[in-house]
Image: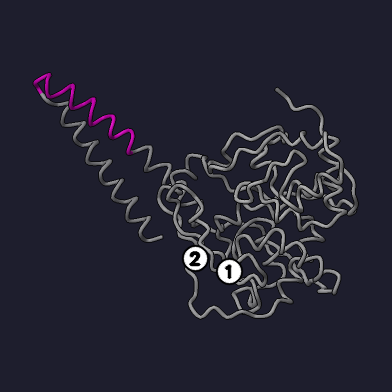
Amino acid sequence: MIGNLLTWLVIVVVTVVFGWLTWRAWRAKRWFVKWPGVVLSGLLTLVLAAVSVTAAIGLYTFYAPRGSPVEALQVAGTPEQIARGEHLARIECVGCHTTNGELPLSGGRNLAEEIPIPLGDFYSINLTPGGPLKDWSDGEIMRVLNEGVDRDGRPLVVMSANTVRYFNADDKQALIAYLRSQPAVDNPTPLPADQPSLLAAVMLGAGQIKFQPPVTVEIVPKGATAAYGEYIVSWRGCRMCHGPELGGGTGTSNGIEVPVGPNLRVVQGWTVEQFVTTLRTGVDPSGHALDNTKMPWKEIGLLDDEELGALYAYFKALPPAQP
């Protein structure tokens, strides 16, 4: 934070200097000094002023506490909840909160390494009872799942954009129950807090990066139905790559480059058996092999048969994509 603030102050000082040079040029008597000086230094002043303002907005958004009051919550931690939470963690959490793609969720991965522009460093924390969550209440963990803010209410950059907010309340409680049940992993070297770069602050201030608001998720009974399939699509984040109507992606999501996903209505020409086989083997009915670095079929293939059946039912029910 200190580095970003010092860099921002330097930009502000340079902006003031160029503003002063613009004023000096305006007062010059010779036209060949006045007008080139006014135009050049004036443009630089405007550009730097815009950067200063957007960076200030972004820095305030990054570092100012926010978030709703913490609810009084005590998760029961039943065997059914723990089993469901482990299932969800294997699908949705291991990609960020492990370095090897396997449980337990011991953290340690710098998620910024996968972003093609220098937005800072964002290390996933240890979510086992050996990490900081041992001192958090269930309500505080629920708030981070809902809103992407830490115990002090400060935004967590990656969690603020994470699709776990689209879990329903039952699944969030199941995930909390599983986090509490994991074997404790002790990471002897504490990981640094989120360290966004000034570029990230500028992008946030300009609206290119957005912290998503909390959402209310209806609890849909689990089953091989289109309604439950739509629920899975929301927390799996399919629309990030496949577009808001699943009719094909554009290559960007929330200002970040993502793979261009195809129109998922291609599934409407498959049988449910072909769909399940594709997500369990990574090879579609035409023999095309899916690239797991772009399409996470291995993670989605961990869904049980009922859940995959729900996805299939939802894709089959999709209306024609809007042009």
Residue 32 among magenta residues: yes
> Where does the image place residue 317, in percent across and percent down from the top left?
86, 35
Label 1: few (<14), some or many (≥20) within 10 Å?
A: many
- Image quadrant holding the N terminus, namely bottom left
Mark 1 or mark 2: name the one nearer the start of the chain.
Answer: 1
> Where does the image place residue 101, in percent across and percent down from the top left?
63, 64
Q: Could you say whether the residue bearing mark 2 is in a helix, strand or loop?
A: loop
- Which label was assigned to residue 193? 2
Q: Could you say whether the residue bearing mark 1 is in a helix, strand or loop?
A: loop
Classify residue 84 as left or right of residue 104: right
Q: Name the residue under label 1.
A: 107
- Image quadrant holding the C terminus, namely top right
Q: Residue furthest top?
A: 31
Range covered by the magenta-colored residues: 29-48
Q: Residue at x 9, y 20 (%)?
A: 30
Residue 190 among magenta residues: no
Q: Residue at x 71, y 71 (%)?
A: 179
Location of residue 92 (image quadrant): bottom right
Q: Mark 1: which amino acid?
A: Gly
Against 157, residue 19 (above or below) is above
For the residue pair 201 and 73, the one nearer the viewer reads as: 201
Q: Mark 2: which amino acid?
A: Ala
Location of residue 26 (image quadrant): top left
